[in-house]
Image: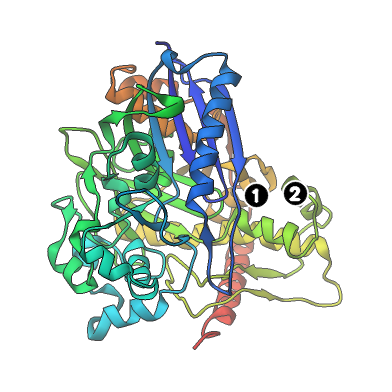
Amino acid sequence: MAYVGAIDQGTTSTRVAIVDHAGTFVGMAQKEHAQLMPQPGWVEHDATEIWANIEEVTAAALADAGIDRTDLAAVGLTNQRETTLVWDAATGEPLAPAIVWQDTRTDVICRELGGAEGADRFRAKTGLPLATYFAGPKLVWLLDNVAGLRERAEAGEVRFGTMDSWVMWNLTGEHVTDVTNASRTMLMDLETLDWDDEIVGIFGIPKSVLPRIVPSVGLIGRGKGVLEGVPVAGILGDQQAAMFGQACFNPGDTKNTYGTGCFMLLNTGTQAVQSTKGLLTTVAYQIASGKPRYALEGSVAIAGSGVQWLRDQMRMIDDAPQVEPLAKTVPDNGDVYFVPAFSGLFAPYWRSDARGVIAGLTRFSEAGHVARAVLESVAYQSRDVLEAMEADSGVDMNELKVDGGMVVNELLMQFQADILDVDVVRPTIIETTVLGAAYAAGLATGFWRGLDELREHWAEDRRFVADMAEDERAALYDSWKKAVDKSLNWVD
């Protein structure tokens, strides 16, 4: 068996990759799923559609590689994190649409749970502030708002999970989640790596609905259907998978993934560093029988989805790659700034009252300035996160590994290096999320011998070096901060 499979169940699509021993993709297939937005602030997915897509895309990836399932040593999974769903314990039928991580309907619940102690009430145990981002409050909303769900949950008839649990239920019959996904629920203690009875009780969640927590790297079960009999041996939340695929195994290693959102993670080793600057403390990964590795994370809600907004709502471009040539029609941003607070601002602000703003418009402004402002907003948000990360960790970064679909945009990557004043390093394989899932499964089953072997597969494609005067960098960032101020206090 010469290959490993990896399922990457993302926010906008599902893809499956077949990877050989050299870490090269030999087969790939991908399919988008619907984004359901029934009212402002709500974002939902159809879990049944997603599972059907996984089966279809898996078969297509095997066909693309010219192999069948018997050629696979193992398969791993990576997934959109925090997206929350519930299903019937007997039939596996979803009992409500999945609530996506971007959804803000739990704002009132989060404020009520915080009480007099506020957003940091559970941070010491969970590493997270109370925010609409996380899965626990989403589950509370479902229990309180789906007719009969709480009664059925208390009777043991309901199962809860983030997207990894849903896929594993269908793929292996096991009701599990791994430590990286569990650390995004606000229900797991970062030290014990188990559900915290006190927090679960405060949230009013029947414990019977919760999945079993397992290490990220280790055998979970065997596949069914199109993956009949294949060992399923790894689960990582998408950003932790990208970190794994970037071979960020040492304390201080840092990566930034540019996808639907933008996510910077710093490996802090076996220490769970508590943030005082608006970052998240999260589990980076755990290899079976080993100690967990932790990370500091800065989460930005809108990155690539800002370009999708230009395409789908504003109709300024027909395809996402057109944003770069449009932005290049102007020499600079023309003093136009875009704050993409469509669902509030995530790290380091955590302001659910913020909404999107385009600031600095004049009669001189044109489409190119807006396109450039959308791209630059990703880089500015990443600087917000990097400054918080350096303050929390005491590490002065001189390079940042980058991955994800947006890193092919060289205008953005150069501006990112310029506004951060650090080297931005793009690897030869930019789809490191799905690669990380493959690495986890292969490591668990002996397909790869250890982390050193995985490090050998990483290779640099291009290094973007800062080429901007400090006074210009400071002036641009100062204007960005003014634009952010304009976005705040929009929603009561």
Label 2 SS? helix
Report the disc number at residue 412: 1
- Left or right of residue 469, residue 41 in this image: left
| Residue 229 in the figure: left or right of residue 25 | left
Alpha carbon of mark 2 to alpha carbon of mark 1: how far?
8 Å
Residue at 23%, 39% in the rendered image: 215
**Looking at the picture, how far across and down is residue 418, in whole percent?**
60, 52
Label 2 with label 1: CB-CB less than 8 Å: yes
- Specify the farthest residue to the right: 363
Query: Where residue 324 is drawn, which disc sits there?
Result: 2
From the viewer's side, name the closer residue of 363 and 83. 83
* Horizontal side, residue 122 vs residue 392: left or right: left
Towards the viewer: 443 or 11:
11
Residue 422 image position (x, y, % from top left): 51, 47
Colour scheme shown: rainbow
Q: Is residue 353 above or below residue 312?
A: below
Q: Quadrant of residue 228?
A: top left
Q: Nearer the viewer, residue 368 or 71?
A: 71
SS class of the residue under badge 1? helix
